[in-house]
Amino acid sequence: MTGVLGRQRELEVLRVLLHEHRDHCRTQLRLLNQPAPDGDGGTEQPALAALTRHRLRDLEHALDALEHGRYGVCTACAADIRIDHLLRQPAASRCPGCTDAGHRHRV
């Protein structure tokens, strides 16, 4: 029972982290959507905005999974994703083993 309670506490810490990352992405998108002072948005801005939107979608999916009790569970093998992995990649939906296996199959 202690293991379950410990994991629940760790997931609550991750909830805060997910919200912070989501808020950061929202702020970054707001800034990226403002016109540049010199009128030149540069070539990186659309790519960075697209990457930020993708990251924001991942974070929102993770928050939804957390709300519905699915966060931290690998979508491929249904094993718990280690907390240390979630701390490095809070929006992860697959465990490192399944992520690595997926990369090998795509190559």
Image (cartoon, rainbow, N blue to C red):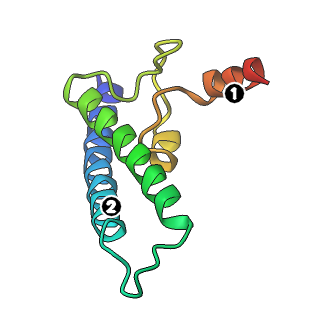
- Outermost residue to the front: 39
Residue 61 or residue 12, whichever sits in front: 61
Report crowding for label 2: few under 14, some 14 to 19, many 20 or more residues within 10 A (C-alpha). Answer: some
What residue is shown with label 2?
Answer: 29
Vertical comparison of 1 with 66: above or below: above
Report crowding for label 1: few under 14, some 14 to 19, many 20 or more residues within 10 A (C-alpha). Answer: few
Vertical comparison of 45 with 38: above or below: above
What residue is shown with label 1?
Answer: 100
Identify residue type, mark 2.
Leu
Q: Tell me whether circle 2 and circle 1 mark residues in contact (CB < 8 Å).
A: no
The residue at 73%/21% (across/down) is 106
Residue 34's spot in the image, x, y percent?
30, 72
Residue 78's spot in the image, x, y percent?
46, 13
Residue 85's spot in the image, x, y percent?
53, 40
- Outermost residue to the bottom: 38
The residue at 31%/38% (across/down) is 11
**Helix, strand or loop under label 1:** helix
Identify residue type, mark 1.
Asp
Residue 95, quarter of picture: top right
